Image (tube, grey):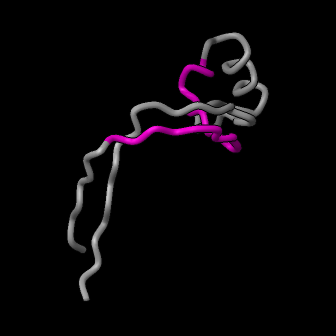
């Protein structure tokens, strides 16, 4: 028996984002320098947003499936 990886696009998703955080790595001379860069120099633009929790209420899928044997 073969195994298949299946993928299907969603047309739309309805729900609520609950919690998230930003994280990343910046270079600085000290913790105080890092804090200054984050607060005053716009280094938060280099942080990635990570979604921690969400609530999905409804979703509508395409009729097409992409199937790949694994």
Q: Quadrant of the C terminus?
A: bottom left
Query: Dominant secondary structure of the magenta stretch?
Result: strand
The answer to whether residue 27 of the structure is visible from this angle is no
Question: In the rendering, at what x and y percent does residue 13 appear?
Answer: 52, 33
Question: In the rendering, at what x and y percent does residue 43 appear?
Answer: 60, 20
Residue shown at 28%/71% (left/top)? 4
Total labels: the figure holds 0
Question: Which one is in front, 2 or 53?
Answer: 2
The quadrant holding residue 5 is bottom left
Q: Quadrant of the N terminus?
A: bottom left
Residue shown at 68%/32% (left/top)? 17
Whether 53 is among the magenta residues is: yes
Q: Is residue 17 left or right of residue 65?
A: right
Residue shown at 70%/27% (left/top)? 34
The quadrant holding residue 69 is bottom left
Question: In the rendering, at what x and y percent does residue 58 appear?
Answer: 58, 38
Residue farthest to the bottom? 1
Examine the rendered structure and indicate whether residue 68 appears above or below residue 14: below
Examine the rendered structure and indicate whether residue 40 appears above or below residue 46: above
Examine the rendered structure and indicate whether residue 4 appears above or below residue 14: below
The quadrant holding residue 41 is top right
Whether 48 is among the magenta residues is: yes
Q: Is residue 6 left or right of residue 44?
A: left
Question: Which one is in front, 43 or 9?
Answer: 9
Question: Which one is in front, 28 or 42?
Answer: 42
Q: Which range of residues does the magenta coloring cover?
A: 43-62
């Amino acid at each position: 028996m073969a195994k298949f990886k299946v993928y299907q696009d969603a047309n739309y998703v309805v729900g609520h984002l609950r919690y998230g955080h930003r994280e990343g790595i910046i270079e600085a001379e000290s913790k105080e320098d890092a804090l200054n860069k984050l607060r005053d120099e716009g280094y938060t633009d280099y942080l990635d947003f990570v979604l921690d929790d969400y609530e999905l209420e409804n979703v509508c899928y395409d009729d097409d499936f992409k199937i790949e044997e694994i």
